[in-house]
Image (tube, rainbow, N blue to C red):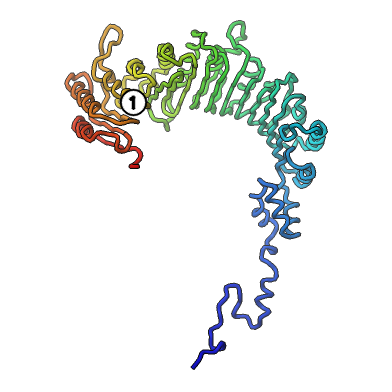
Amino acid sequence: MATTKADLPTPIHPLVNHEATSASEPLHHYQQPPIHHLPPEVLCAVFLPLAVCYRDLFRARMVCKYWVEVIDSTPELWTSVSNGLHSELQAMIIRNSGNQLLEVDYNECYWLGDSKREHKIAKYAWLMKPTASRWHTLTYHQWQGEIWPLSLPLHNLQRIDMKVLAPNSQRSTLDAPKLLYVNINHVALDLSSLSRLQFLILQAVDCNLDELTAVLRTSPGLKELSLKQMSPRIGTRGLPSSYMSKIHLPQLRNLHISGVLAESSSFLLDRIKAPSLEIFNAFVDDPSDVAAHTQLCEAAGRHLGTFPLPKSQKANFKIATWRFTIDCGIGERIFTIVNRSWDGANGRQAILASIASMTERIDSRTREEITSLEISCHYDDECGECLRIVHLLFPRIDQIFVEDRKTRETQVLSVIQHLSLPSQLGLTAEWLFPKLAKLDLCLRGSTSTDIGNRMVELAERRKEIGQAVEITELRIQVGFGKIDPSAVEILSQSVTQFELVPVGGPA
């Protein structure tokens, strides 16, 4: 018997209510989308991610009248205004933002080459000045001329990023009592009017010692200080005794100095007491002033070796050289000094002298806590002198990590050589690091059996002399497939514990 259409089962559709008694019931159920029944506060939470892009916000406004009403009556969606936006949109933002704090952007590049530039600047300033007390952040870039926002009452401003390409001679006092973050470039600002800052970044700012020390003394919560291309020379002659007292910055973690005279940099470091300092970068611009550079290294060393070390930090000392750069570290503290006059063979002695000046100022109690060394040198002949410097200062080191930045293992071989023989230290010869028990070698290139033979010789010699602890642990990191199998066999027999860690994988 043939199957008729009436015998076929009714198809199930996911959007149809098949339990309805009439065909009109499911249709009526979907005439009003559920989104229209959401309360405004729920829709606001949905729309908030759109606040970062007005284009997306206006697309949402096109959906229905209800969405328009909710969006336009939600001030949190209208908090960012820029002179790059259309003037009608700028006015709409100010109107819809209510009493919300504003993120303000002003960049004259938007009007570059515009014949109506001056008119647009005046119009934007006229629109924004009445809202100055609501500004939360200000990003301001201009070519030259008057910096009109600086004279406004910026009572809620917490962050300012300001860059003027042409130096500005107009000196301004900023009325911003809640300011926390200051990043200014070529702006003549009276720094003494600032206080309670957390971030201070100055570039090409003409300030005197009075202003700089004043803002530091009134900002004990400062976390980052950056000084770039600062012109005034800071000396110690004729200064009041108040300048010589310490400036306590217990939360300072990052300090960057670039294009500042070494004399000024060392003077500032000597004034600051920053036990939490973790990162220090100094780019020296006056390499001919050897005495001032030595003072800078000594001042850096005092901060590097501040006692006590934070409990979360490992008791290890790091030293690395690369052309005209020195990196020294204790635990998580990393100090970098860059001096371009060191580039080349003539700068090697200056690098070593700078390392010695820095490490000699490390607190003796900190030295006693150091038990491991990480070393990497640009030139092989720097390794020996660096090892001798560290040996004299850190008597408890029992493990060394060596990173070879070159394509051959020459630096590792140099370290092994200096550990295999007594070193001349003054009038006596001593074995370096008599407590050394573990070596960790990181190799970048291929490794031949030569390093295996050298390692066996090192282990045997230090075991025979009786003046040093026997090396019992060896760990090697090397590129996958870059080590000779015979070298692995030799190395595994030279120590009690041997670990080979391939880096990367087969092609």
Residue at 40 percent of width and 11 percent of height: 349
Look at the image and tell me in which quarter the C terminus lies. Answer: top left
Instruction: Identify residue type, mark 1.
Output: Thr
Q: Give above or below for 101 relative to 458.
A: below
Residue 107, x across and y down, in percent: 71, 33
Q: Give above or below for 54 relative to 234.
A: below
Residue 29, x across and y down, in percent: 67, 73
**Of residues 219 and 429, the one drawn nearer to the viewer in this rendering:** 429
Is residue 81 shown left or right of residue 463? right
The image shows a total of numbered marks equal to 1
Is residue 290 shown left or right of residue 219? left
Question: Which image quadrant is residue 166 in?
Answer: top right
Residue 472, x across and y down, in percent: 23, 30
**Of residues 497 and 378, the one drawn nearer to the viewer in this rendering:** 378
Question: Which image quadrant is residue 408 in?
Answer: top left
- Residue furthest bottom in the image: 1
Pointer 1 local density, CA inside 10 Å: few below 14, some 14–19, many at least 20: some
Is residue 233 shown left or right of residue 157? left
Residue at 61 percent of width and 26 percent of height: 200
Query: Can residue 444 be seen at all in this image of the molecule?
Result: yes
Query: Can residue 305 be seen at all in this image of the molecule?
Result: no
Question: Which image quadrant is residue 268 in?
Answer: top right
Residue 9, x across and y down, in percent: 53, 84
Residue under pointer 1: 371
Q: Give above or below for 234 relative to 493.
A: above
What element does badge 1 sit on?
A: loop
Residue at 32 percent of width and 23 percent of height: 411
